[in-house]
Amino acid sequence: MALEPPDDNDDLLPCGNGEDALARHLMAGRTTDHEAGCAHCRSAARDLEPLISVLREPPDEETTAPVGLVDDVMRIVRSERRNTRTLTLGGAGPGTTEIRESAVATLVRLSARDVPDVLVGRCRVRRTPDGLVVSLTVLVVVGTPIVEAAERLRRTVRALLEERLRLAVPRIDIDVTGLVEPG
Amino acid sequence: MSGERHEVTAPSFVPDTALPEPVLVERAQDGDDSAFEILLRRHQDTVYRITLRILREPGDARDAAQEALITAWRKLPTLREPAGFGAWLRRIAGRRALNVLRARADTDPIDEESAPDLPGREPDAEVLAGDLREALSRALSGLPPSQRTCWVLREMEGWGYEEIAEVVDATPTAVRGRIHRARAHLVKALAPWR
């Protein structure tokens, strides 16, 4: 074997050049001056040549996932819904009306679409003696005044929950986790 | 939701499929499976390519990809940095493929420590003219699972040692050693093509 020494800590060629570095340079088609002139490097490069050539060959076609892969996964995912907690809504009855927290989160996100320049990520709701506490993470479009945008979002979400679900919303916590480019 | 509708009704409206990845990840972490589905459609080709390159058998690669994606759903709440979703998913795919390889090695008589060399016969002219890629594929199947995974992730997928180390559960130094040994094996197997 031309490539020595086979030590876990050190795969240097006898000249001190790294074997991996040489392979990287050959793959990129850009060897260093040392590699072009050094006998050890040139010998190693000859050994590597078939391997490098097959790696540099472009694939016949891009690998694409088999049809139906995502559908199969989603069938299992949907059978494992993780948040099935519900909130009980008021109403004259008789009978009870409950809504899943996940449905409340969906409603919140849909309402947030009307608020320009903010994107809602996480939405958690928590029942407290005073009503529903909502926690949101949002991304804000660069250049948007953040305090004003958060206020608009808070007003919109509160109005939705109070009007549609008749739930008191004592507080909405908004965590701006990042900024996004417009468009 | 179509792009047309977006433009006509509300200029600020972003269709879900165009949402930035961290937003989709956070929604999926909340249990929003439609957000997760969008993420899967974005990343499925990469995940499958990784499992196929490691396993080299489409049926096994599909199964491994499917298991990796389901694992990702189950572990998603533990992902700390939503922006790192793609890399995190790739690591799960690599790990899943490695486990399949190891299960195969348990049933096949391949010794993890000493990879058998290819049969030492001289390839004839026809084989020489044949596909070098096919020869590489045969040579790879002679490598122990971890060596093969390290080599594929490094040389075909371009990963760094640290990232590979996480997948094969070893130190970056050990990864470097495995790639070195794998490369030596492959160089030897492809020697007739020099």
Image: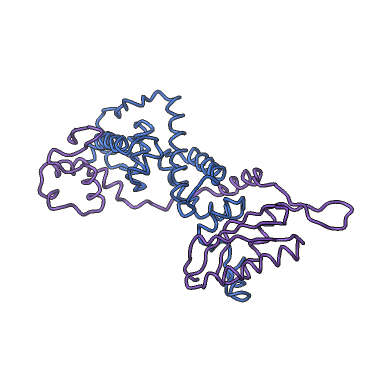
Horizontal arrangement in the rendering, residue B77 relative to residue B149 (left or right): right
Q: How many marks?
A: 0
Horizontal and vertical percent position of residue A53: 26, 47
| Image quadrant containing the N terminus of chain B | bottom right
In this view, the residue in front, B188 or B78, is B78
**Residue farthest along the front direction in this orientation:** A130
Q: Residue at x 61, y 76 (%)?
A: B8
**As displayed, is residue A67 above or below residue B169?**
below
- Position of residue A130 measured from the top left corner of the image (x, y, whole percent): 72, 56
In this rendered view, identify the residue nearer to me: A123 or B163. Answer: A123
Residue B140 in which image quadrant: top left
Looking at the rendering, which quadrant does residue A124 occupy? bottom right
The answer to whether A112 is drawn above or below residue B40 in the figure is below
Q: Position of residue A8 (x, y in %)?
A: 26, 33
Identify the colour scheme used: by chain
Quarter of the image for the C terminus of chain B: give it.
top left
> In the image shown, does B160 or A158 lie closer to the viewer?
A158
Tell me if residue A64 can be seen.
no
| Chain that is coloured purple in the picture | A
**Residue sticking out furthest to the right:** A94
Residue A104 in sight here: yes
State which quadrant residue B147 falls in: top left
- Residue at coordinates 17% horizontally, 41% vertically from top-left? A44
Using residue B22 as the reference point, say whether residue A39 is left or right of it: left
As drawn, the chain in blue is B
